[in-house]
Image (cartoon, helix red, strand yellow):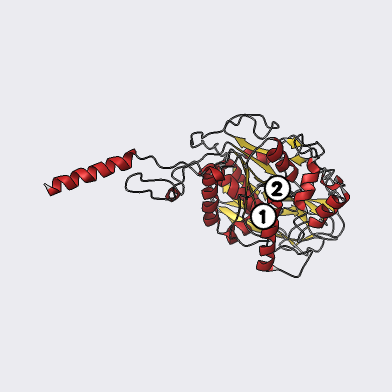
Amino acid sequence: MSRIIFLLFALTTVAAAQATPLPGPDERYKADLLVVVAHPDDESGDIAGYLARTIYDQHRRVAVIFINRGQNGGNQVGAEEGNALGAEREIEGRKALASFGVTNVWFLETPNVSSQNVMNSLEHWGHGAILEQVVRLVRLTRPEVMLTWLPAFVAGENHSDHQAAAVIATEAFDMAGDPAMFSEQLVRDHIGGQSGEGLLAWQPKKIYYYSDTGDYPDYGEKPQLPAPYRKPFVEARGPVYSNTDLSPTQHAPYSRFAAQETSFYLTQEGKVGADAMERRDFKEFERPARLIFGKSLVGGSTTGDVFEGVIPGAIPWRRTALPDREKPKGVSLELGGPWKFYQEFWRIHNIEHLADLLPVPETAVRPDVGYLYFPLLLQNNTDSFQEVTVTSELPERWTAKNGHRSYRLAPGEVYPVRSLLVPSDTSKEAWREIKWSVQVNGREISYVTMRLHMGALGAMPQ
């Protein structure tokens, strides 16, 4: 009898557990817009006015993820460096965002890497580990829209941490709704107590980017020398928000809020914002916020409002089909390193239109650079051995350390080539062009072009 009573009790307990609903997500952390950037102050200046518009006048909830504390940056107000500086910059970031009422702010534990090569930051951060953390926070905050740096190699400051934050954010956008990705974060068992982390898979609806390039005619006191080859690549690529407009609820221009938010970052360029607030002159912050459309799962236009087509609530996750990759024919040459990475990255994440921003690759070069290194990839897509020669066309008085080289490629072989160049007179601001060619039997069959903004004071190390 006692065994029967115990069995009935157990079945009743299980039934009760099955009938008891789990609590829903914690609404305190729900965000309409999730900003994912690398360092404290990445959200100031360029998008701060837009954030004010979103918060005050569209009544949207904003949350922010900083991938690190910017501990390798400069310090304009004290002697603190490294982790001590990072501690200061975290407080600056929290105060700056709190001035807008944004308190859901997370700082992740990664090193601050100074480079132009996105692969350097992803390597030192621990790509997979940091991606897991961002996916967790996307599922916790359940954003409708995500906003991050531009995942592309551009001739601007081009910080590798900025690019890596964009890569991680884009990957998290696609993975957070997939129940097979980091499934240990999710609710798995309603019987006998909750396991996992109690989160639900969540698919954001849209993602937008912005860039730190100086490729604007109104960028700072001394704009970047315009490229003679093209127009500014950000034109008509996404919505543009004026910072001279007056907020209808706050009765002040958005440029004022951009200056206010920037003023907290005194270790960085915050004095510009503090001086603007004191003088009540916000001209330095009137440059509009120019966003770049990434992708939308709910329709809408490229240049329409960020929240166009967004209806609050969950949408189903579904795996998107990848576009077919056209395999090069014959013998071909292409850039390796970060440029090759982005070709694959854009295709896999269905944002191949970003390749159209800069059809010809380019980078910025500091005045003190002594040499330039570019990774190239030779490919033999024929069914026979090929004798090929790589040559380069360089600006006047430049030299190639490895000169003309010949290679014998097996069928199907991909061979990495290092091009080491010594430039001449990098101190003068100018645009230069390099061309590498592949020749078979004396005939050019493939080439790659690179454009360089020389003498760029804001450029990161190569």
Q: Which one is nearer the viewer's eye here, 268 or 237?
A: 268
Residue 275 in which image quadrant: bottom right
Helix, strand or loop under label 1:
helix
Residue 440 location, x and y as percent?
A: 66, 49
Image quarter of residue 16: top left
User: What's the mark number on residue 94?
Assistant: 1
Task: From the image, tell me which residue sits under label 2.
Answer: 448
**Total numbered labels placed on residues in the image:** 2
Left or right, residue 17 beside residue 412: left
Mark 2 residue type: Val
Mark 2 / mark 1, whichever is N-terminal: 1
Q: Residue at image x 59%, y 55%? A: 415
Q: Nearer the viewer, mark 2 or mark 1?
A: 1
Do residues under tags 2 and 1 come within 8 Å of each other at their CB atoms? no
The quadrant of the image that shows the C terminus is bottom right
Q: Position of residue 221 (x, y in %)?
A: 87, 50
Q: Is residue 88 visible?
A: yes
User: Which residue is painted at 70% across and 39% down in the image?
Assistant: 56
Q: In whole angstroms, how far apart are the C-alphas of marks 2 and 1?
A: 45 Å
Q: Is residue 404 above or below residue 140?
A: below
Along the line of sight, the residue nearer the viewer: 244 or 7: 7
Q: Could you tell me the amino acid type at mark 1?
A: Arg
Near mark 1 (Cα within 10 A), the count class, few <14, some 14-19 or many ≥20, is: some
